[in-house]
Image: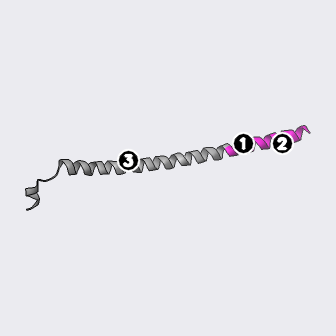
């Protein structure tokens, strides 16, 4: 009976370790997706910021545009 209990305990420990590994893997995947989306948004915001600064501060006057 002692061997059966030891085997059950070992199986339960193994199952818990596999489950926690799956949970951690899922969390890391979600974090990677979130960071990727944040980086993409930051790059888009930076590009839009550069174009906005160019448009606001480096516009040519109207009389030069018509030539």
Name the residue: 74% across, 43% down: 14
The disc placed on residue 7 is 2
- Image depth: mark 2 or mark 3 in front: 3
Residue denoted by label 3: 42
Residue depicted at 38% across the width and 47% down the height? 42
Q: Earlier in the sequence, mark 2 or mark 3?
A: 2
Which quadrant does the N terminus fall into?
Answer: top right
Please report whichever mark, 1 or 3, sits nearer to the chain's N-terminal start: 1
Q: Main secondary structure of the magenta part?
A: helix
Cα distance, mark 1 to mark 3? Answer: 39 Å
Name the mark nearer the viewer: 1 or 2.
1
| Badge 2: residue crowd in 10 Å (few <14, some 14–19, many ≥20) | few
Q: Which mark is residue 16?
A: 1
Q: Residues within 10 Å of mark 1 (few under 14, many from 20)?
A: few
Going from the N terminus, do you reach mark 1 or mark 2 first? 2
Compute the Cα span from label 1 to label 2.
Answer: 14 Å
């Amino acid at each position: 009976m002692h061997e059966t209990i030891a085997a059950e305990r070992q199986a339960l420990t193994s199952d818990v370790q596999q489950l926690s590994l799956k949970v951690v893997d899922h969390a890391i995947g979600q974090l990677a997706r979130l960071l990727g989306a944040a980086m993409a948004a930051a790059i888009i915001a930076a590009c839009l910021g550069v174009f906005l600064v160019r448009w606001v501060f480096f516009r040519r006057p109207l009389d030069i545009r018509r030539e």
